Image (cartoon, rainbow, N blue to C red):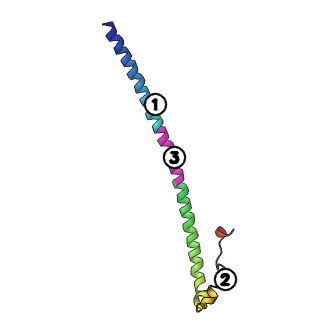
Amino acid sequence: DSSDDMRKVQRREKNRIAAQKSRLRQTQKADTLHLESEDLERQNAALRREIKQLTEEMKHFTSMLNSHEPLCSILTSPPPPPEVLYATHSFHQPHISSPRFQH
């Protein structure tokens, strides 16, 4: 029957188009995931570099602190009286300064 054949042809065409769209969506999703993966890899590498740099900085400051502690008059002298500690006009000056924390 010609109308059945026509319906089969239309259904096949509709199915072909749907399959084509589905493959296109899958390809686009795979491309998006690939780009996200590359971006996350770059972020991960940057964070690993930052961890390495901060670890080295921590080692440097730990070494400086260890060499400073035996010579530190603040650590070896008795603590000042509370009125000196809490005076409104006094402020703390750091012993060790880092360019990273200076303004």
Mark found first going from the N terminus, 3 or 2: 3
Q: Amino acid at mark 3?
A: Glu
Q: Residue at left 43%, top 34%?
A: 26
Label 1: which secondary element:
helix
Whether residue 94 is visible here, answered yes or no, is yes
Residue matched to label 3: 38
Mark found first going from the N terminus, 2 or 1: 1
Quarter of the image where one finds residue 92: bottom right
Query: Would you say 8 lies left or right of 42 here?
Result: left
Q: CA distance from mark 3 to mark 2?
A: 54 Å
Q: Which residues are magenta?
A: 30-43
Q: Is residue 24 above or below residue 64?
A: above
Q: Amino acid at mark 1?
A: Leu
Label 3: which secondary element:
helix
Residue matched to label 1: 24
Q: Amino acid at mark 2?
A: Thr
Label 2: which secondary element:
loop
Label 3: few (<14), some (14–19) or many (≥20) C-alpha neighbours in 10 Å: few
Label 1: few (<14), some (14–19) or many (≥20) C-alpha neighbours in 10 Å: few
Residue matched to label 2: 88
